[in-house]
Image (spheres, rainbow, N blue to C red):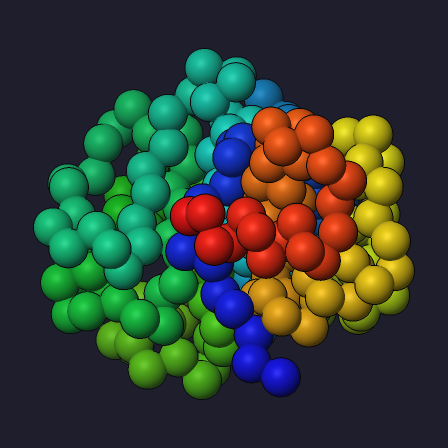
Amino acid sequence: MKQIALDIGLARAPTLSGFFAGPNEGVHRHLQLWAGSPTRSPVPTYLWGANGSGKTHLLMAVAESLREQGAQTGWLDPSVHEPPDFNDGWAVVLLDDVQLYTAVQQHAAFNWFVNAQALQRGVLAAGALPPADLKLREDLRTRLAWGHVYQLQVLSEPERRAVLRQQADARGVFLGDEVMDFMLTRFSRDLGHLVELLDQLDRYALQTKRAITIPLIKSMLESQ
């Protein structure tokens, strides 16, 4: 059955506390301690795993945690076509989807990395592949492999169901098994997209004064 990938962003900024760790408890705990420490280690961390494993969520959650502490961060992903120069005011450099970087972005990432290390600032990066398999310039690839390296595991279907059930309960929303089945088979299984879909359904159900059912989901999609 064809899945529908919704072209939507998260309604709220991702948080470390809102990340359902499941099999990724080790890296989750590492980032909680690291981001929350006023004297965080400058040793870099690299996360890798398949789409939907939570890499971008964790990078954005770290950025949000630091923002709440009044710290500035540098962010680079493939959509940043003209990366800025390194800013001495950055507490941490965040590099997402490094496997997709162009030559210009690789040059900027290497420059940011070197400057961050010289100033004892943190570096948190993420990609789809382990460092050894990245098709990047060698000096950048070896730096990404130097510190902590964690592989993120995609949540199993029972774990995704548990998260959706937990999120629905927190909103006071009832999700029947048939609705859960429909969401998991017809939409992107990325957890961030599923939670955003739940937010949309909750709002639409309140507006239309209807329970969340499969017909309601289809009606919402038709109205967009």
- Res. 79 image quadrant: bottom left
- In the rendered view, tell whether residue 209 sits above or below residue 148: above
Which quarter shows the N terminus? bottom right
Q: Position of residue 109 (x, y in %)?
A: 27, 56
139 sits left or right of 16 in the view: left
Residue, x 15% and y 41% (percent of image)? 84
Q: Residue at x 85, y 41 (%)?
A: 174
- The residue sitting at 21% across, 51% down in the picture is 80
- Vertically, is 66 above or below 19? above
Q: In this orientation, does residue 57 appear?
A: no
Q: Nearer the viewer, residue 54 or 10?
A: 10
Residue 138 is left or right of residue 62, and the answer is: left
Drawn side of residue 1 relative to residue 180, left or right: left
Q: Position of residue 154 (x, y in %)?
A: 69, 68
Residue 142 in view in this figure = yes
What residue is rendered at 83% in x and 48% in y? Answer: 175
